[in-house]
Structure formats: C-alpha cells, structure tokens
Image (spheres, helix red, strand yellow):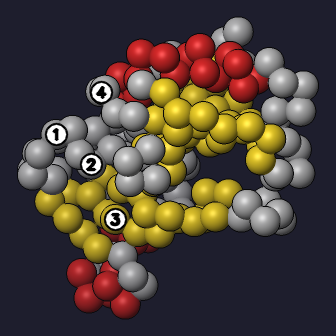
Amino acid sequence: MPFRYRGLPFAPFEPLVRMSDAELQSLGARRMIVDETPGFPCRVTLEDAAPGERVLLLSYAHQTADSPYRAAGPVFVRENVRATYDSEETPPVFRTGRLLSARAYDSAGMMVDADVSGADEIESLLARLFARDDADYVHVHYAKRGCFAARVERA
C-alpha cells in the first residue's frame, strides 16, 4: 500500500524568519545554528538541516482535531527552506536510524492504534495501521523526544 508523506507548509513560519531573536523569544521560539547532523530535522522539507544552517525551534499545533488527542509540540524549521515535502517516497529523516512512533487517528481525531518501529520497519508499521478501516491518517513522531515528525496519509 503506498503512503503519502506530508511535511508542514512553510507559509505559517515565514513571518517568524524576519523576526529578531528577542521577538522570537517573546513568542517562546528560538533561532538556532545547527551544530550536528542528524539532530535538527526540518518539519517542512523532512530532511535534517546541515551544520551551519539557521533553524527556528518553536511549538506547533500538529494535532488540531477537536478531540482529547489535540496536541502541540516542538518542531524545527529551516529558515531558508525549500518546497514542502509531499511524496510517496519515504522521507530522508525517516531513514536516519531514529526510533519512530506512529499514531493512527480516525476522521474525528481519535487515536485508534499506535506503535513504534525502527526506520527500516516504518513502512510495514504504516501498512498495519492503515489496514484498519477506521485509520484516516497517521502522525509519526520521533519516539525518544516525542516530537511530531510528519503526517502520513493513504496515497
């Protein structure tokens, strides 16, 4: 079963790029310089930012459904971002050996199943989750830190 991996759109973050560090801090966000890779996975491009790149670290509401599973969490966004990742190919950040957590939700935003996997097993985990008739979409998180990584849908 093919999947569609979707990064976040850049438009909501674009105004933040033009803000000063003090303005960002007043919003609870930070500008950082990447000092290692992997370690700063961009949620727009679904690639790790390279050392020396500037990224924004901020809280983002990734699960906006009107349900008990409504959630926000930290995300990195590259300042000089390219196009939003939207593809049936497994994104680069999912191939870096990170432990991944996948959470399947129904159309009302209620979690119907969840599990963890290594990067080499994410497609089989997604296939199992989407085998459920009630699974509408899946949110993948980086299991160790719990941060939202990307949304996955049926292709």
User: What residue would you read off at disc 1?
Assistant: 37
Residue shown at 70% from the left, 9% from the top = 1
For the residues bearing labels 2 and 1, Cβ distance under 8 angstroms: yes
For the residues bearing labels 4 and 3, Cβ distance under 8 angstroms: no
Query: Counting other residues with Cα less than 10 Å from the Cα at mark 3, is it few (<14), some (14-19), or many (20 or more)?
Result: some
Q: Quadrant of residue 62?
A: bottom right
Q: CA distance from mark 1 to mark 4?
A: 10 Å
Amino acid at dot 2: Phe
Query: Counting other residues with Cα less than 10 Å from the Cα at mark 1, is it few (<14), some (14-19), or many (20 or more)?
Result: few
Query: Counting other residues with Cα less than 10 Å from the Cα at mark 4, is it few (<14), some (14-19), or many (20 or more)?
Result: some
For the residues bearing labels 1 and 4, Cβ distance under 8 angstroms: no
For the residues bearing labels 2 and 3, Cβ distance under 8 angstroms: no
Examine the rendering and report whether any part of residue 7 can be seen: no
Amino acid at dot 3: Leu
Question: Image height check: is 64 above or below 136?
Answer: below
Amino acid at dot 1: Thr
In this rendering, would 17 be left or right of 88? left
In this rendering, would 33 be left or right of 109? left
Classify the position of the C terminus by image quarter: top right
Q: Nearer the viewer, mark 4 or mark 3?
A: 4
User: What residue would you read off at disc 3?
Assistant: 57
Point out which mark residue 62 bears.
none
Amino acid at dot 4: Thr
User: What residue would you read off at disc 4?
Assistant: 96
Name the element at disc 4: loop
Q: CA distance from mark 2 to mark 3?
A: 9 Å
Q: CA distance from mark 2 to mark 1?
A: 7 Å
Q: Quadrant of residue 47?
A: top left
Question: Image height check: is 73 above or below 127?
Answer: below
Q: Earlier in the sequence, mark 2 or mark 4?
A: 2
